[in-house]
Structures are given as structure tokens and as C-alpha cells.
Image (spheres, helix red, strand yellow):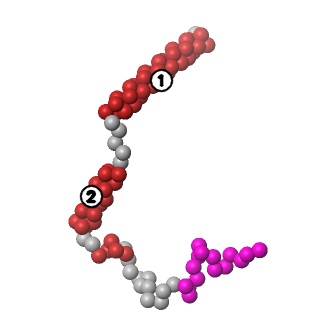
Amino acid sequence: MTDAVGSIDMPDAEDEAPDSNKNRKGGKRAKKGPLKRLALFYRQIVAELRKVVWPTRNQLTSYTTAVIIFVVVMIGLITLIDYGLGHVAKYVFG
């Protein structure tokens, strides 16, 4: 049986670097101004959008068609259920 003391999840106080500054707030973000942070955020958004695999026109057309067909089928099912429950309510409550 192993002992959980000194596990990787909870480092001991001796393991921490003695020169680490615990009173520092914000880390690297505190050194940058709000405009630099906003510019960094924008650059990160652009970088993430470049990683996206955009669909081709044929894929987009087929996906859109599938969604429209699904929505029309669901509208039909909900209409039938609503119509049926309306008749059941009329029958039960007169």
C-alpha cells in the first residue's frame, strides 16, 4: 500500500522554489496594458480561426439541405402531436 503524502498532486512546501514571489498578483497579465491584452486576444482569435477546417460549397449545401429537411420533419411531427392532443383534450373535457 502506498502513502498519499508527497504525491504529485500536492507538492510539499520544501519542493517550491525559495525565490518564488507569492505576493505577485496577475502573473504576466499584470505587466501588459489593456490595449496589449486586447491585441493579444485578437491575434489569438485569428490564429484559432486559421485552424478551422471550413466546409466546401458542396458540403455546406448538403448540410443546409439536411438541416432544413430535419426541421420540416420535426415541424410536421410536432404539428401532428399538437393536433392529436388537441382532439384528445376536446374529447376528455368536452
Residue type, mark 1 in image: Met
Residue positioned most to the left: 35
User: Which quadrant is home to the C terminus?
Assistant: top right
Who's the residue at 60% across and 75% down the image? 8
Q: Closer to the camera: disc 1 or disc 2? A: 2
Residue 74: image tag: 1
Let me know if residue 38 appears in the view.
no
Who's the residue at 73% across and 75% down the image? 2
Residue positioned most to the right: 1
- C-alpha separation, residue under disc 1 versus residue under disc 2: 39 Å
Foreground residue, 47 or 58?
58
Foreground residue, 18 or 44?
44
Q: In the rendered view, does 4 fall on the left or right side of 81?
A: right
Let me know if residue 46 appears in the view.
yes
Residue 84: image tag: none
- Picture quarter containing residue 39? bottom left
Instruction: Look at the image and give the residue range highlighted in magenta.
Output: 1-15
Majority secondary structure of magenta residues = loop
Residue 42: image tag: 2
Who's the residue at 37% across and 75% down the image? 27
